[in-house]
Amino acid sequence: HVRPFHSSAYGTSPSRNVNVVMISTPILLFLFYSQVQSLPRSHSDDNPIVVTPREGVPIEPMLFGVNDIIGPVNPIPYDSPQLIQTVQSLNLGGMRYPGGTVANYWNITSGRYVAKCNASCCTAFGSMVNKFPIGTFSLANMASTEGMSSYTMAGKPLIDLNCLTQTSAALIDQLDLLDPTCNSGCLIELANELYLNGEDYIATFPTVDDYIKYIQPVVSKIREKFPKAIISVPAGNSGSATSLAKKPLPSNRQTHWITGLANRSDLFDAITIHDYTLNSGYLNNKTKEYWPSIIAAFPDGLYKNMVAALKPYFSSKQYWFSEYNTGRPHEADFLREIQGTGLHGLHTLSHIMSGIQYSSNIKVMFYHSLLNVNGSGWGERGMVWLDSFTSTMPKNNGVSQLFAHINHLANTSSHMHGVDLKGGPTVPHGSINVLANLSCVQAVGFSSGIPESDLTYVVINRCGETVSVNLKLIAKFRVGKIVMYDCSDVKNNKWTVMPSSKETFPWPNPVQSTVKSMS
């Protein structure tokens, strides 16, 4: 039985103790919003949810990563002990260099913003970056054996190149800097969010055809020099991706951009999509009684719809979600209230678990962003707190606490499993269609060994009722344990000192957890 707003992971092994991770969610939250007490309840014992694991596929490290913006926004040298400790403690799968918007104005050689840049990121952070020697925040330092990206599961960063504020010829000249990072294969993005209506973006690329013309010689050179590299182009946000299912298609820049790329899909291997969809449009007075379920379940429904909408246009391409989070906290009071809590952590887990469920297409899933540094203006949703740019004591919140645990499972497993769900109650969704027909639970599995000989489940209960769950196992169950996180308290976002050992799970704070043995 999985209590309201709990997630659970169960492990099996014929020869050793294994973790059974149960990640619980908002019990008290439902009490806090008294309207939720009127939600319909099901007789779950009579109709259990049956969870059956699919065949395992190798772990994709980049599903467990972050868009870090270290250097351009948070100028901390890449070999700093506090950054390396953070990467190791979080068991990070991958990192994105140099970040998102900042990449459009960044010089990967000097590790500084381009000259004569008037963009907000340049004016806000350029002077701080320039206090460091030239090259401090270069790609070479980020990807070096001493750089923080070398401590990730992937061992190298995803590289976002500047196609906006330099010529294609200048960019081609910089490709030598991708040695040796890309010699054995790497992930390359060709700019960030150029489909938006930004003044600089429209001036440089009035249409997607102008962008295609720009990248053609760049792509040819990358193919020649780094034949194992995987190239992605900025296709749209989750709204424009799901709109591909509409008939007729909307007529706007984003739709023209993504459909134009579909017509030239011979040029690239992947498309990049960003998701910040969950905002006040979904969290309003009409849906208040469902807020906890919406927060915990929204990514699951979104990716189900998005993958279905994208496949007719990009069936053979990889989908990279190199930025995801909720909408900005100021967009809805409830978003501001849950920032850094266990409930926000469940929203983050749901993104990662959706990536696993649809891993035949989704290969990158990066949380935005890594750091919240006191005094920096772009860290409102960071999962790690630093008191200053020189602080040596990283602190975690509810997001990083749960994020680190699922990453630990990935880091200590060889395979991941999507699941098939059958029976049981569904998520209460009000009028939000994206949540329609979703099971009360979301689940994935992790295993080790070939053939897989053990299995650890991660399960989230997104409903306001206790549900009965039957978990199919790979091997006969012997001994295990359940770790339960209570993600119900929206005030549990107090920053606490991050454990220094990457093997310490569950972390003690701020989300409360309970460990039970089972046999």
Image (tube, rainbow, N blue to C red):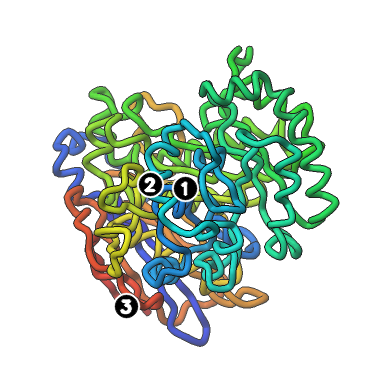
Instruction: Provide the residue designation for mark 3.
Output: 517
Q: Nearer the viewer, residue 510 or 375?
A: 375
Residue count near mark 3 (Cα–Cα under 10 Å), binned few <14, some 14–19, many ≥20: few
- Using the image as rendered, state which of residue 407 and residue 211 is in the foreground: 211
- 287 or 2: which is nearer to us? 287
Q: Is residue 176 left or right of residue 62?
A: right
> Which residue is rendered at x = 52% and y = 77% of the image?
476
Question: Which mark, by number, is residue 347?
Answer: 2
Nearest the viewer among 393 and 3 is 393
The three-letter amino acid code for the residue at tag 2 is: His
- The spot of residue 120 in percent (x, y) is 42, 33
Does 23 sit left or right of 445 as displayed? Answer: left
Badge 2 element: helix
Residue 290 lies, in percent from the top left, at 28, 34
Q: CA distance from mark 3 to mark 2?
A: 27 Å
- The percent coordinates of residue 431 (x first, y second) are 36, 24
